[in-house]
Image (cartoon, rainbow, N blue to C red):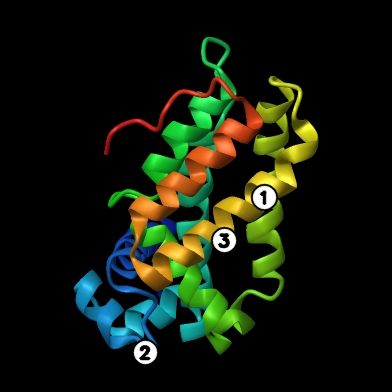
């Protein structure tokens, strides 16, 4: 009689694989994940079926973490003007704690690995429209959600290409002032 699947073991392996992929990028082979989990390739394949199924599970796990963290950053706060919320979110999203998400999902968009998650680019864009619309509605700017998202995404690409966070911060400050001329300056990094 064969072994019975143990979901708690698969979940622990997935957590470690996701941590590794966020820190080092999505690997192109199983060996880095084997080392990160302290298990064997055979055990990873036993729990996830194939390399691609494991990588997709890692991507989905990372995306879930990403949505939770950034959704919290973009969430409307009743006691705070939304331009202030956006400024704080921008500083956090471009800070070192959030860089792993930007690296991983940028890597996915750039590689043929996107075949692991068809439609990812569209979903990764539209996921943020709802929270932005809700927040921007509080300052009568719900119709600006696509514009704000496009500026954020463009500035992410700019920072990735140039490393010039000061210039991106200045541009984001201009966006905040366009939304609200009395917008507070960005929080200090």
Mark 2 and mark 3: span between their CA atoms? 31 Å
Residue 119 drawn above or below residue 138: below
For disc 1, the neighbor class at 10 Å (few under 14, some 14 to 19, many from 20) is few
- Looking at marks 2 and 3 on the same chain, the residue that comes earlier in the sequence is marked by 2
Relative image position of residue 98 (x, y in whole percent): 36, 51
- Looking at marks 2 and 1 on the same chain, the residue that comes earlier in the sequence is marked by 2
What residue lies at 46% left-to-right and 34% top-to-bottom? 87
For disc 2, the neighbor class at 10 Å (few under 14, some 14 to 19, many from 20) is few
Look at the image and tell me whether residue 6 can be seen: no
Q: Mark 2 and 3 residues: CB-CB less than 8 Å, in contact?
A: no
Residue 31 left/right relative to 149: left
Provide the secondary structure element on which disc 2 rests: loop
Question: Which quadrant does the N terminus fall into?
Answer: bottom left
What residue lies at 56% left-to-right and 75% top-to-bottom? 109
Residue 161 left/right relative to 124: left
Name the quadrant containing residue 27. bottom left
Provide the secondary structure element on which disc 3 rests: helix
Relative image position of residue 94 (x, y in whole percent): 38, 50
Name the quadrant containing residue 113. bottom right
Nearer to the camera, 136 or 172: 172
Nearer to the camera, 9 or 68: 68
- For label 2, the residue is 29
Residue that protrudes farthest toward the top in the picture? 79
Mark 2 and mark 1: span between their CA atoms? 29 Å
Numbered circle sitting on residue 154: 3
- For label 1, the residue is 127
Provide the secondary structure element on which disc 1 rests: loop
Look at the image and tell me whether residue 161 can be seen: yes
Mark 1 and mark 3: span between their CA atoms? 16 Å
Residue 28 drawn above or below residue 152: below
């Amino acid at each position: 009689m064969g072994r019975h699947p143990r979901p708690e073991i698969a979940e622990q392996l997935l957590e470690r694989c996701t941590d590794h992929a966020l820190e080092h990028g999505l690997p192109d082979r199983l060996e880095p994940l084997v080392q990160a989990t302290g298990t064997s390739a055979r055990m990873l394949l036993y729990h996830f079926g194939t390399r691609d199924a494991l990588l997709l599970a890692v991507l989905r796990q990372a995306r879930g973490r990403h949505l939770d963290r950034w959704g919290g950053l973009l969430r409307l706060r009743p006691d705070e003007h939304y331009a202030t919320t956006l400024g704080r979110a921008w500083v956090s999203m471009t800070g070192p704690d959030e860089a792993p998400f930007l690296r991983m999902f940028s890597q996915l968009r750039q590689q043929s690995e996107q075949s692991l998650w068809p439609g990812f680019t569209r979903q990764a864009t539209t996921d943020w429209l709802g929270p932005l619309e809700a927040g921007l509605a509080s300052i009568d700017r719900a119709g600006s959600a696509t514009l704000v998202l496009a500026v954020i995404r463009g500035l992410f690409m700019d920072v990735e290409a140039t490393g010039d966070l000061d210039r991106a911060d200045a541009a984001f400050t201009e966006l905040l002032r366009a939304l609200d001329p009395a917008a507070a300056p960005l929080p200090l990094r």
